[in-house]
Image (cartoon, rainbow, N blue to C red):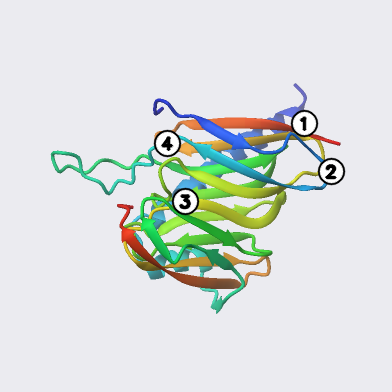
Amino acid sequence: MRRRDAMRVSVGALVALTVPARAQQLLAVQQDATLDKVIAAFTDGTPIAEGGVSLILPDVAEDGYRVPVAIDAPQAEEAMLIAPGNPVLAVLKVRFGPLAGSQKLSTRMRLAQTQDVLVLARKPDGSVGQVARAVSVVVGGCA
Amino acid sequence: MAAGVKTRVKLPKEVRAGEVVTIKTLITHRMESGQRLDAQGAPIPRAIIHRFHCTFEGETVVDLEIGPGISTNPFFEFQARVPGPGVFSFAWHDDDGAIYTDSRAISVI
């Protein structure tokens, strides 16, 4: 093995070790956090502007266990979905990589009760936008 | 490793270079939230998929950190730009340490 190959292997091992550790740490912070803490963990003190991102949700969710939700955050590098009325507020954080074809993501979420669902999005210039949407929940999903 | 976990991925088999494709993914997983109680009133420990990562030839498409607020059998739909022929890799990280993976090759016409 040449020295160059050895270097390549060690760098690869380092990346493999550090990346998952960081991801788990962020989740641990957000597990029992209050709304302010969850928002601060994402914005890191940046003032939040209204808009710049859209949140597609039904007005009335019949079944709180699976509510279809879509985030559309044009040009954003990261977005975060927050359910302030759920036991665990941080629902999802998405990072759009260099090969993302758009900054859209659709999924299904749990909603414990009627609430204003919130989405935050950060653009590459560091600015943060937010949008909230009220959803009436008929049968709460124990989130 | 939880039993009976199945992954499903839907995307076109071939595209034009530079085209944007829609990818739909699903994994069968109960996503135990950690909030529920069992018959004896004891809390059922959390057991969820906490991360989903999609890459194309080593470059990230989307990287998701997931909380217990995502429904059972997590479904994700997103879009990817395909610069050339290659393989999409998908990885779901379970709380129990298991990593479920899937991959799809895509060709360019």
- Kindly identify which chain the residue marked by label 3 belongs to: A
Please provide percent x and percent y for residue A33: 36, 61
Residue bearing mark 1: A4
| Dot 3 crowding, Cα within 10 Å, few <14, some 14–19, many 20+ | many
Foreground residue among A29 and B103: B103
At horizontal 53% and vertical 72% (from top left) the residue drawn is A130
Amino acid tagged 2: Ala
Residue bearing mark 3: A108
Q: In this view, does A120 lie to the left or right of A62?
A: right
Q: Residue B29 carries which label?
A: 4
Q: Which mark is residue B17?
A: 2
Mark 4 and mark 3 residues within 8 Å of each other at the beta carbon: no
At horizontal 70% and vertical 47% (from top left) the residue drawn is B80
Amino acid tagged 1: Arg
Q: In this view, does A45 lie to the left or right of A34?
A: right
Disc 4 from disc 3: Cα separation: 13 Å
Element type at marker 1? helix
Amino acid tagged 4: His
Q: Are discs 3 and 2 both within one chain? A: no
| Dot 4 crowding, Cα within 10 Å, few <14, some 14–19, many 20+ | many
Q: In which quarter of the image is residue B44?
A: top left
User: Given this view, does label 1 or label 2 mark the residue nearer the observer?
Assistant: 2
Element type at marker 3? strand
Using the image, determine if residue B2 lies above or below residue B95: above
| Dot 2 crowding, Cα within 10 Å, few <14, some 14–19, many 20+ | some
Disc 4 from disc 2: Cα separation: 34 Å
Q: Is residue A17 left or right of residue B61?
A: left
Q: Quadrant of the N terminus of chain B?
A: top left
